[in-house]
């Protein structure tokens, strides 16, 4: 190929044409074949092990794409979660770690690696629609490492499970502390498997007023651009501050604490109710580049483990494999 001719042709193009060429190149790159989906879930002793390559079992969006310049590639995951998780004395922040993993082996991450002026208290939201981070139709995108991951309900995977139409509670995955993750459909009476299903609501709401400005913050009205734009209001919805509750489920008829993926903030839980396994801690840049989740190079969540105590229903038996 004559590179001089190519460079000359590119220089002659108008900005709008260059944008078209870039998008076309992204589409071609995104169409490249990726590894086959692999996941293996097993139980032994007191643990459940999920081994996976992180490739989804549904067709992902095309990557690279606008807002996300990364390509999907196979990973080497081995996650461990307890079969009988216990609620800890204090919740633990999931910042800087995988929140959990879907049953198809693709991890969940609630936060992002993008911050206003590098200030971690002003963390941009992936799902708010105010910052284009290249999420696909499955609420997922790709990190520079090639790790495809979900920031909300994994639409394609849920469709493969039978959809999320309110006919049954839908088990989607497990959090790092071992508690199950469901969609927002659950029993209207938490302790009754005979009660009708309803869509559970988050208990978070937008703050009123405006953000601090100048050196203290980005200013402007609280509108959902940043995680800090929201506040927890106990009783405002059906779920607690970890976006979960205790109740019976098809897989846990004796009851368990469980998390929900909601259509509104926080979408995914931002904190663990139990004690996370270290296999979910990670490091490296976020989807936007260096200075990723938890700080440059990433940081593990602060370890605030406390002695477990009973909370609502006791965890039920592990679901059948």
Image (tube, rainbow, N blue to C red):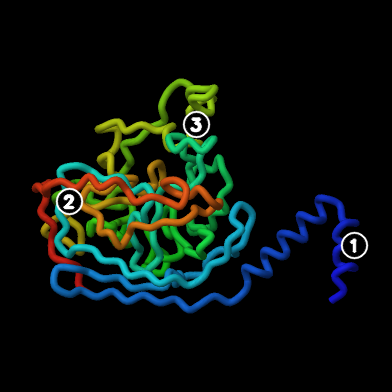
Q: Residue at x 13, y 65 (%)?
A: 317
Other residues around mark 2 within 10 Å, as few (<14) / some (14–19) / many (≥20):
many
- Residue ID for mark 2: 247
User: What residue lies at 61% left-to-right and 62% top-to-bottom?
Assistant: 64
Marks 1 and 2, the one that precedes in the sequence: 1
Q: Is 184 left or right of 289, judged from the image as shown?
A: left
Query: Distance from label 1 to label 3 (Cα)?
Result: 45 Å
Which of the 4 quarters of the picture holds residue 66? bottom right
Which numbered disc covers residue 8?
A: 1
Q: Position of residue 234 (x, y in %)?
A: 25, 32
Contact (Cβ within 8 Å) of mark 1 with mark 3: no
Q: Which of marks 1 and 2 is in front?
A: 1
**Circles 1 and 2: CB atoms closer than 8 Å:** no
Label 1 neighbourhood size at 10 Å, few (<14), some (14-19), many (20+)? few
Report the front residue among 271 and 154: 271
Q: Is mark 2 on a helix, strand or loop?
A: strand
Image position, residue 307 (x, y; %): 11, 47
- Callout 1: helix, strand or loop? helix
* Residue assigned mark 3: 223
Is tag 1's residue or tag 3's residue first in the polypeptide sequence?
A: 1
Give x and y (percent) for residue 252. 17, 61
């Amino acid at each position: 190929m004559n590179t001089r001719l190519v460079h000359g042709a590119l220089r002659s193009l108008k900005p709008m044409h260059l944008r078209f060429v870039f998008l076309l190149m992204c589409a071609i790159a995104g169409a490249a074949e990726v590894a086959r989906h692999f996941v293996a879930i097993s139980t032994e002793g007191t643990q459940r092990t999920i081994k996976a390559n992180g490739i989804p079992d549904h067709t992902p969006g095309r990557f690279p794409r606008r807002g996300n310049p990364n390509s999907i590639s196979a990973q080497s995951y081995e996650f461990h979660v307890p079969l009988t998780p216990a609620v800890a004395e204090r919740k633990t922040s999931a910042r800087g770690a995988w929140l959990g993993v879907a049953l198809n082996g693709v991890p969940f991450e609630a936060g992002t690696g993008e911050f206003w002026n590098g200030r971690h208290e002003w963390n941009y939201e992936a799902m708010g629609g105010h910052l284009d981070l290249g999420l696909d139709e499955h609420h997922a995108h790709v990190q520079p490492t090639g790790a495809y991951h979900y920031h909300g309900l994994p639409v394609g995977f849920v469709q493969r499970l039978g959809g999320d139409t309110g006919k049954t509670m839908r088990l989607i995955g497990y959090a790092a502390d071992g508690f199950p993750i469901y969609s927002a459909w659950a029993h209207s009476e938490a302790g009754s498997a005979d009660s009708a299903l309803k869509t559970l609501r988050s208990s978070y709401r937008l703050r009123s007023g405006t953000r601090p400005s100048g050196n203290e913050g980005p200013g402007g009205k609280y509108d959902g651009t940043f995680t800090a734009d929201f506040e927890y209001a106990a009783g405002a919805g059906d779920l607690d501050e970890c976006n979960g509750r205790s109740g019976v489920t098809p897989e846990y008829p004796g009851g368990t604490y469980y998390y929900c993926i909601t259509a509104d903030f926080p979408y995914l839980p931002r904190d663990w109710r139990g004690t996370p396994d270290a296999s979910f801690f990670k490091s490296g840049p976020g989807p936007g580049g260096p200075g990723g989740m938890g700080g440059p190079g990433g940081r593990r969540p602060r370890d605030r483990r406390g002695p477990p105590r009973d909370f609502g229903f006791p965890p039920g038996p592990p679901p059948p494999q």
